[in-house]
Amino acid sequence: MLFQVYGDNALYQWLGWIMVFAGLILLNEFARRSKVGGVIMFMALPIAMTIYCIAVSVGADTWAANNPTVLFQNGWFHYAKVYAALTGCIGFMIIKYHWGKLGKASWFKCFPFVIVAINIMIAVVSDFESALHYFDYMSGVIQTVDGGPGGVLQNGSVVWVTSEHATQVAGWNNVFNGIAGILNIFCMTGWWAVYTSKNKQDMIWADMTWVFIIAYDIWNFCYTYNCLPNHAWYCGLALLLAPTVANALWNKGGWIQNRANTLAIWCMFAQVVPQFQDSFPSYGYDSVFAVQSTLNATTNTVVAVIALVANVAALGYIVYRAKKLGVNPYTKEVFVGTKDYEQARARIDEKELAA
């Protein structure tokens, strides 16, 4: 079993998952279907969130010492992730609405690749950071878990406790998944083949097909399972499935926009209301919606190996397609002629394709 979804809170935990999944899909639809929706979600709300976060950070040593954002979301990763995701959302809006010189510049079409690569590398660094704690423990640098930075649980798993009080399983699982994340960056193809949909609601990246999406989803789930074990039930399952389902059923070719939108929405919510998913009774927060992973090194390693194999397979298939078509997979599209690609391409504004 991957998660501790049993016992008295199981009903609430499943209800929480359904609420997060449905909420992300609905808010993504609100954000993508109009300029007003996008501006509200990715410009107005982030300003309010930033003001709040600055306020509680300034008061962290006094009145905000027990604020949930300060206790559970005040590390470098969470801020890097939320603002990187928001940067992606705004950049995608610039492209699909052709705002200003950037929105009309052909060179700026590679922005989606750049911002996604940055987001992936943020997670890769976090995985490798956790791996370093494992090697520190094995070399005797850290020795405890109760009240300390690391140690061994009763099941034999080496763990470390973050500054935000979360216990992470550390080991070769982090190394394997970190490598998978780096490979995943090179699974993005056709970097400049990004267009606006006919109805002006979406930014379409037709060459980002199920090959990349599945490899990304498995890798990112493993990342959350490794480094956010108390959040992965939501950000590793509900958050990943929301954009993937939308892409599969009604928004073909718009996965990366869906992903950025839902990621930014979730990160903002988690930054301001972390007590929804965090349960630390000793700090006065005990959520019935909170779900912890099993914190088992064997399980983490199996998931990491699957992620690594999936990304090796995806990259191998891309190399095969590129050689078959005789193209550079990064300057040209390699999935031309496949079902996913053609369905997405059919949604693109013909004027842009002709330009």
Image: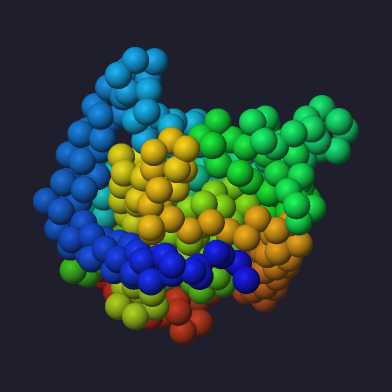
Q: Quadrant of residue 145?
A: top right
Q: Quadrant of the C terminus?
A: bottom left
What color scheme is it? rainbow
Residue at far left of view: 36
Q: Would residue 347 be found to the left or right of residue 80 on screen?
A: left
Q: Would residue 94 be found to the left or right of residue 253 on screen?
A: left
Q: Position of residue 23 (x, y in %)?
A: 26, 63
Report the residue at 25% width, 29% height from top. Answer: 52
Residue at far bottom of view: 339
Figure check: 74 above or below 267: above
Q: Would residue 295 be found to the left or right of residue 208 on screen?
A: right
Q: Position of residue 349 (x, y in %)?
A: 25, 68
Of residues 232 and 197, the one drawn nearer to the viewer in this rendering: 232
Report the residue at 54% width, 49% height from top. Answer: 228
Report the residue at 65% width, 55% height from top. Answer: 295
Q: How many marks?
A: 0
Q: Quadrant of residue 162?
A: top right
Res 29 seen here: yes
Q: Quadrant of the N terminus?
A: bottom right
Res 109 seen here: no
Q: Position of residue 41 (x, y in %)?
A: 21, 48
Figure check: 6 above or below 185: below
Q: Position of residue 208 (x, y in %)?
A: 48, 66
Report the residue at 20% width, 41% height from top. Answer: 45
Q: Would residue 62 be found to the left or right of residue 123 on screen?
A: left
Figure check: 100 above or below 257: above
Figure check: 177 above or below 67: below
Of residues 126 and 13, the one drawn nearer to the viewer in this rendering: 13
Of residues 288 and 224, the one drawn nearer to the viewer in this rendering: 288
